[in-house]
Image (cartoon, rainbow, N blue to C red):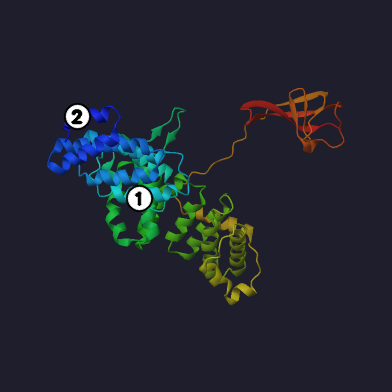
């Protein structure tokens, strides 16, 4: 039987399998030897480092082996080593997007009952890695809830500044978003009531955070406290006046029917990509139908259905239910755009001190141009350095002499200013 020193020499020499077998044999004879148990932990960590980017299944088995080793929580250096290995496992790009969730689930099931060291850089970086790589993992919210705010360092509550000078959301706010979304999606009202004091503290101590007040309002709305939700949303909507989901949430919190309708109208006018607002269309249709505006309700229902069909999404039960109503068959699929705009303007009057963006008209720099046209095969052309859009070219040919007026514009692709023709003289 080898001594701890001899086993340590095997480890240093890279003979990990021999060192592992030897330390297990020694521990079987001396199960209370802390030095041997610590040595076993380091040997397992060394083996995990090798498998983190090569064999996910083996890595999980070795992690279970580390848990069985029952290394005391006081061995902070060893647990830091373990955290770095787990982070390397999570960040390994060789795992496909389809494989990663199952490995994260297996990983979480092992470490959740371990005395993982917290309030340290390795743990914070591991949490950040899981939130980033596991954004589509179904249990990421549960993982965030397990972490909690008590595990974070002071710097984790501050926005992260990239090398390019861009501010990213603080780790604490990222964690909060995952927790809140999980609680709301599961509609676990008991856990929501328990979590609200932490959420309120986070909002109070970090007023610069954008999303915690929003999720706090949704929690109160989930518990049926519409007045509290509405009061929390008012300052939030001042920060995000052009986001449709802010006005949609205001509509959900409103208890007055006309106010709710106005908020939905404002939400419908906010620009967004098709598909992102499909739930808004459904909820707004319900509100319009309740107000007796059946033509507009049918218009929104038809639009939501068309978007769902285009994306091969199933129609929801509320949509199907409204489509079976007698008023739906009798209604014309039409919405009064002017009426919607009037109601949207009315919505803004309910938000005190709402800052509206005012259009500014900076002076446009123009210049006349004249010269030989050099056509591109794609239809556009150039006269010297002036870009000539294809829409302005009708019968002109390559080599023709043309003249006109050009405006100074910023070319995003070239990241520089240039002139583009806005008019060609006859």
Q: Secondary structure at mark 2?
A: helix
Q: Position of residue 405 (x, y in %)?
A: 77, 29
Displayed quadrant of residue 409: top right
Is residue 76 rendered to the left or right of residue 282? left
User: Disc 2 marks which residue?
Assistant: 6
Q: Position of residue 119 (x, y in %)?
A: 26, 38
Residue at coordinates 59% horizontally, 39% vertically from top-left? 359
Q: Position of residue 338 (x, y in %)?
A: 63, 57
Q: Secondary structure at mark 1?
A: helix
Displayed quadrant of residue 209: top left
Is residue 299 rendered to the left or right of residue 232? right
**Res. 170 in view:** no
Q: Nearer the viewer, mark 2 or mark 1?
A: 2
In the foreground, 377 or 20: 20
In the foreground, 235 or 389: 389
Residue 164: mark: none
Residue at coordinates 38% horizontally, 46% vertically from top-left? 57
Looking at the picture, does residue 78 appear above or below residue 138? above
Q: Quadrant of the C terminus?
A: top right
In the foreground, 156 or 245: 156
Residue at coordinates 57% horizontally, 54% vertically from top-left? 275
Residue at coordinates 65% horizontally, 66% vertically from top-left? 333
User: Disc 1 marks which residue?
Assistant: 106
Looking at the picture, does residue 25 appear above or below residue 340? above
């Amino acid at each position: 039987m080898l001594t701890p020193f001899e086993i340590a020499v095997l480890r240093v020499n890279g003979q990990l399998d021999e060192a592992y077998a030897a330390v297990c044999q020694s521990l079987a004879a001396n199960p209370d030897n802390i030095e041997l148990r610590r040595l076993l932990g380091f040997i397992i960590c060394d083996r995990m480092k090798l498998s983190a980017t090569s064999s996910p299944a083996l890595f999980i088995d070795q992690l279970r082996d580390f848990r069985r080793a029952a290394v005391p929580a006081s061995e902070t250096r060893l647990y830091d080593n373990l955290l770095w290995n787990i982070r390397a496992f999570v960040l390994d790009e060789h795992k496909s997007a389809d494989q990663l969730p199952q490995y994260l689930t297996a990983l979480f099931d092992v470490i959740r009952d371990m005395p993982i060291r917290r309030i340290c850089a390795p743990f914070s970086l591991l949490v950040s890695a899981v939130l980033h790589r596991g954004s589509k993992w179904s249990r990421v919210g549960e993982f965030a809830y397990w972490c909690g705010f008590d595990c974070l360092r002071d710097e984790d509550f501050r926005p992260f500044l990239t090398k390019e000078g861009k501010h990213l959301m603080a780790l604490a706010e990222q964690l909060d978003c995952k927790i809140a979304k999980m609680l709301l999606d599961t509609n676990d009202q008991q856990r929501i009531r328990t979590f609200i004091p932490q959420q309120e503290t986070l909002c109070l101590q970090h007023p610069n955070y954008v999303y915690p007040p929003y999720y706090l309002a949704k929690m109160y709305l989930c518990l049926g406290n519409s007045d509290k939700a509405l009061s929390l949303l008012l300052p939030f909507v001042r920060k995000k006046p052009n986001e449709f989901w802010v006005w949609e949430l205001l509509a959900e919190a409103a208890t007055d029917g006309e106010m709710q309708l106005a908020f939905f109208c404002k939400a419908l006018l906010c620009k967004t990509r098709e598909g992102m607002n499909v739930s808004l269309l459904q909820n707004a249709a319900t509100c319009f139908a309740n107000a007796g505006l059946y033509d507009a309700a049918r218009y929104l229902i038809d639009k939501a259905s068309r978007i769902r069909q285009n994306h091969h999404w199933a129609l929801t039960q509320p949509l199907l239910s409204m489509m079976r109503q007698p008023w739906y068959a009798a209604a014309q699929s039409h919405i009064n755009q002017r009426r919607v705009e009037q109601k949207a303007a009315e919505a803004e009057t309910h938000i005190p001190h709402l800052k509206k963006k005012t259009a500014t008209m900076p002076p446009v720099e123009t210049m006349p141009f004249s010269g030989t046209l050099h056509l591109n095969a794609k239809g556009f052309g150039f006269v010297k350095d002036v870009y000539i859009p294809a829409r302005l070219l009708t019968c002109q040919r390559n080599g023709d002499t043309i003249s006109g007026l050009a405006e100074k514009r910023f070319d995003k692709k070239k990241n520089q200013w240039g002139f583009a023709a806005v008019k060609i003289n006859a």
